[in-house]
Image (cartoon, rainbow, N blue to C red):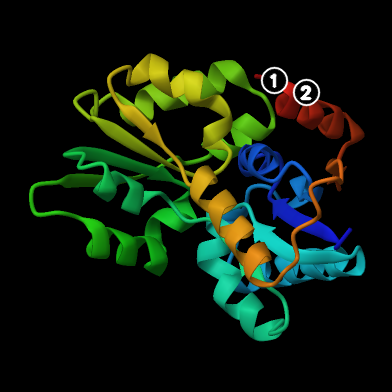
Amino acid sequence: MKGNIGVFDSGLGGLSVLKEMMKMLPNENFLFYEDSIHNPYGEKSEDELLDITSNIVDFLLANDCKIIVIACNTATTSCMKRLREKYPDVTFVGTVPAVKVAYDGNYKETVVLSTPFTRKSKRLIELVHDYKKDDQNIYNISGENLANLIELDKKPEMRKLIRNLLKDYTFADSIVLGCTHYSLIKDEFRKVLPNAVLLDGCLGVSKEVKRQLEKRDLLNSPDIEGSVRIINNKDESLIERSYEILNKE
């Protein structure tokens, strides 16, 4: 056994990434840190987020993590560059809105929905600039406090907000779910935009994690049965809910 795959997010959202990685890497051991105390990340400054995420990285490294996955678009766009500078010997894999996936799919009317921070981030602006085709429209909109409503499992408020956010985009053929929390409620988006293809970065992150582990000869042997350990720094009941989400088809 060659250590754990460390994963963290501002709460439960990163479960969408973790679930995909578990399918692709069934022999690996995962340690998922849910930072629900500091949720939502999208309302914090870059310096605040760097302090928060550095403490999590220290914890994961102290728990034998061989690679760290930032399963959060906001933390990736805000902190990953500085975390790589601060921890030069650590391999980080981040999560960014799947704008390239929309580009590769030749979609013409794409809504990119992300947290207030990610929406205005330099990284997302670069992605749109790099991957927007001349005949493609991209609508970059904020999900406001949707991630927090998902975290708190406030379904009526969550559904109302989704309807309000997307009511003017019923013509869209695709929607980029630019926050890992959003990928946990795909059925709710399908109700509002039934004709749009839902795009997220979970599969791409999983492929990159596997590639990095192969490159460094850090994959567990195929005879090892993988495991998952979840830590939530706010509430034990959220850990139970997390396992339920992971086990749900």
User: Does 79 appear above or below 4?
Assistant: below
Residue 103 as seen in the image, left or right of residue 248: left
Residue 179, can we see it? no
- The spot of residue 78 in percent (x, y) is 54, 67
Mark 2: which amino acid? Glu
Residue 244 numbered tag? 2
Q: Name the residue under label 1.
A: 248
Considering the image in quadrants, where does the N terminus appear?
bottom right
User: Does 139 appear above or below 46?
Assistant: above
- The spot of residue 184 in percent (x, y) is 58, 30
User: Does 249 appear above or below 149?
Assistant: above
User: Does 104 appear above or below 164?
Assistant: below
Q: Which of 114 and 40 is in front in this view?
A: 114
Q: Which residue is drawn at 49% across and 25% down?
A: 186
Mark 1: which amino acid? Lys
Q: How many marks?
A: 2
Circle 2 residues within 10 Å: few <14, some 14–19, many ≥20: few
Residue 142, can we see it? yes
Considering the image in quadrants, where does the C terminus appear?
top right
Q: Residue at x 85, y 45 (%)?
A: 223
Q: Nearer the viewer, residue 108 or 210?
A: 210
Residue 117 as seen in the image, left or right of residue 148: left
Q: Do the residues labelled 1 and 2 touch (CB within 8 Å)?
A: yes
For the residues marked 1 and 2, what is the alpha-carbon distance in whole angstroms?
A: 6 Å
Q: Which residue is drawn at 87% across and 29% down?
A: 237
Query: In the figure, residue 110 lies in which quadrant?
Result: top left
Give the secondary structure at mark 1.
Answer: loop
- The spot of residue 104 in percent (x, y) is 27, 48
Give the secondary structure at mark 2.
Answer: helix
Circle 1 residues within 10 Å: few <14, some 14–19, many ≥20: few
Q: Which residue is drawn at 87% across and 37% down?
A: 235
